[in-house]
Structures are given as C-alpha cells and as structure tokens.
C-alpha cells in the first residue's frame, strides 16, 4: 500500500490535481467540511496523509509515507534525509531579503555588520549571510516576520515572497533574492531503492505528467 504525505495550504490543490491525473483521487481533502487527516483513494491501492508543509519530510524520512510533496524551501531549511526526485513546477515563490521601504539599504551586502535579521528560515538565512562574509544576528520568528522591521527589532527579514503584496502593504521592499522555491516530490530512500509498493511506477507516472504539462505550455 502506497502512502503519500500531502501538504496543507497553498500546495494542496495542485498536488491533488497532479495525483488525480495519475489515478489517485484525494479530492476529499479539498472539502472544507472534511476533518479526516488520512484518506484512501477509491481503489484502496494508496492513501494520503494531510500534514503541515514542515512535517511532510518528517513523515517521509521516518518511513510513514513512501512519497511526499513539499516546498523546496522546507528541504533547504530542514535538510531531511530523503530522496529528492522531481521539481513539480508549481507553488512558485522565492526566499528573499526585505527591508523597510524607508531603509537606506538596497542590497544585502550593504547591511551593517551585526545587524539583526528576522526569519523563520534560520538555517537558510545564516548560510546566505555567511556566504557574503557578513556577520548578522538571526532572530527566529515564526509568526508575522514582517513585524521585525516594522517594530525596529530587526533591520531586515528573510522570508518567502510570492506576489510581494504582503511586503508592499507593510511598507517593505525586496532587496535580494536568495533562491526560488517550487513544490518537490520526495521519497523515503529505502522504499525508493527497493521499489516498495511499486513506488517507482508512480514516480514515473508523475514525471511523465509533469513533462507533458511543461510541453503543453
């Protein structure tokens, strides 16, 4: 029996549509009245777990799911021991450095040494500023990171940006892009290697679907 970990939030709709295209229907997760966190497809050949985006690689790494769909940003931040298989080409966003619109700084390297930078992506932020050889203090925030510069607690933030609307509405501007993120297909390494529950056939179906979609565009 194949088990797939699916992410709550913005990636869920596209993930369910992708799986439906290969014969696995987990559309019940899109029903606002549904409270189930584990559902089977109609053939009972596979089931899906609905978990937080951050938790998808945990379920895969510990073998509770053979496959998972998760944002690349989470893989960069958490560095789980999973097999990275496919870029699914949806859920596009970017991890960026942003400051107040009134800030004099227009690139990350201009930030003063030992500035405070607020982020929920602590490892990614640390790695980025280390690559610039710029010592900064990373302030971990897991709610509204934008409040860091607004309140004066931090000079800048490192956060995910999609449309940029949230930044604009809070008088913040992007000054640097660190990396782009999309949804990724991951697998439990041993399950993938021994082809547990014919997981490689499902991966190939997903790969062909993604390639066909790319060609149609």
Image (cartoon, rainbow, N blue to C red):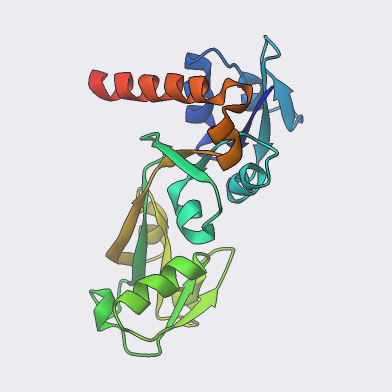
Q: Please identify the residue farthest to the right as the structure is shown.
A: 35
61 vs 126, left or right, is right
Q: Quadrant of the N terminus?
A: top right
Q: Is residue 8 visible?
A: no
29 vs 209, left or right, is right
Q: Position of residue 67 (x, y in %)?
A: 57, 34
Q: Is residue 101 visible?
A: yes
Q: Please identify the residue farthest to the top as the structure is shown.
A: 43
Which residue is drawn at the image coordinates 29% and 61% (left, top)? 177
Q: Position of residue 130 (x, y in %)?
A: 36, 78
Which residue is drawn at the image coordinates 30% and 79% (left, top)? 103
Nearer to us in this view, 173 or 95: 95
Nearer to us in this view, 100 or 85: 85
Which residue is drawn at the image coordinates 54% and 12% (left, top)? 23
Q: Say if 26 sits above or below 158 in the image.
A: above
Which residue is drawn at the image coordinates 35% and 68% (left, top)? 98
Q: Position of residue 65 (x, y in %)?
A: 65, 36
Q: Say if 87 sits above or below 171 in the image.
A: above
3 vs 122, left or right, is right
143 vs 138, left or right, is right
Q: Please identify the residue farthest to the bottom as the structure is shown.
A: 113
Number of marks present in the image shown: 0
Q: Position of residue 47 (x, y in %)?
A: 68, 24
Q: Say if 84 sits above or below 132 in the image.
A: above
């Amino acid at each position: 029996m194949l088990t797939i970990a699916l992410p709550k939030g913005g990636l869920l709709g596209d993930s369910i549509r992708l799986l439906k295209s290969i014969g696995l229907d987990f559309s019940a997760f899109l029903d606002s009245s549904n409270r189930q966190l584990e559902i089977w497809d109609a053939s009972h050949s596979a089931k899906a777990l609905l978990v937080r985006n951050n938790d998808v690689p945990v379920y895969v790494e510990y073998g509770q799911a053979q496959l998972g769909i998760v944002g690349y940003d989470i893989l960069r931040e958490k560095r789980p021991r999973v097999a990275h298989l496919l870029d699914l080409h949806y859920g596009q966003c970017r991890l960026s450095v942003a400051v107040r619109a009134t800030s004099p700084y227009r690139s990350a390297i201009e930030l003063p040494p030992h500035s405070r930078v607020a982020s929920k992506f602590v490892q990614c932020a640390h790695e980025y500023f280390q690559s610039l050889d710029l010592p900064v203090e990373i302030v971990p925030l897991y709610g509204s990171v934008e409040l860091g510069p607004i309140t004066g607690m931090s000079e800048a933030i490192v956060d995910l940006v999609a449309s940029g609307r949230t930044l604009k509405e809070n008088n913040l501007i992007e000054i640097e892009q660190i990396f782009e993120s999309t949804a990724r297909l991951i697998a439990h390494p041993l399950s993938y290697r021994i082809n547990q529950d014919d997981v490689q056939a499902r991966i190939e179906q997903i790969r062909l679907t993604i390639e066909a979609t790319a060609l149609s565009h």
